[in-house]
Amino acid sequence: MAGTPREFHKPVRLPGETFDRLFTGSDPAEVSRVAHSTAAALLARVRNDPQPEVIDRLLSFTDEHGLHDVAELWSKAPAHSLPGALWMLYLLQLTIHNDPRTAALLYERGRIELPSVDPVVAGAPVPASPDELVAVIDTILRGAFTGDFAVALDRAAAFCRVQASGATHLADDYEATEPARATTFTRRALRLSTMAVDLTGCAGLWRREALT
């Protein structure tokens, strides 16, 4: 997978622009209702009848369609909601699929630097190759549909924290010689850290039966 150009049946559009175009003039409450109802229906459908071919299609959804169709449904949902949680999982998956080499670099640096159990919780091999990291994120997403949803969210959050640590340390490495690159890694670390917090929050809500 690494080094192979990726092809999509649909272009990857900016989520916000896509959502705004589709729902301009619509009632925000209706948009929210659609986001929550589709997320709940999808999760219930797969859990009630976990056919392998259906799960495989869901896992490869962003490979086939980019992020466009997912963004249409869930990108504007609150972070601490079921559609918000699914949106973050798909966004994380596509990020890893699109650039597994950088993802593996960040993950390995974070694994070395981060003094926590997050690498164990995330469950990646040591060290993790780009292809192995892709397999890990696919396994996490599969677990969201077939296993304990809260555990899948916790694994995704740990995965984000490890990568955020790696991005932070790489930003420090490049600060003196390549400040623009350092800024890019700093921004990525912030996004990953924010996502980790939100995913952990969603996991807690799910365990209290309050994630809707």
Image (cartoon, rainbow, N blue to C red):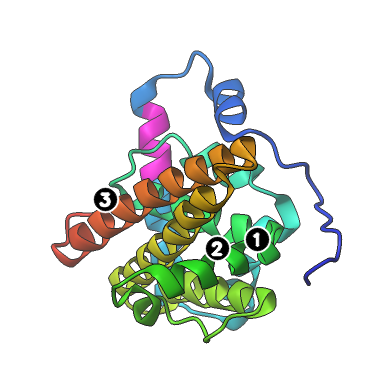
Residue highlighted by disc 1? 102
What is the quadrant of residue 209 in the picture? bottom left
Kindly state the secondary structure of the residue where label 1 is placed: helix
Q: Secondary structure at mark 2?
A: helix
Residue at 36% across, 46% down:
194
Measured Cα–Cα span from mark 1 to mark 2: 6 Å
Q: Check the image and report above or below for 188 versus 144.
A: above
Residue 127 locus on image (x, y percent) = 56, 83
Q: Which residue is rendered at x = 50% and y = 54% of the image?
A: 167
Marks 3/1: CA distance? 34 Å
Which residue reaches farthest top?
Answer: 25
Q: For the view shown, which residue lies furthest in the left direction?
A: 208
Disc 2 crowd rating (10 Å Cα; few below 14, some 14-19, many 20+) is many
Q: Residue at x 48, y 43 (%)?
A: 186
Range covered by the magenta-colored residues? 30-36
Residue beneath label 2, please? 106
Dot in front, 2 or 3: 2
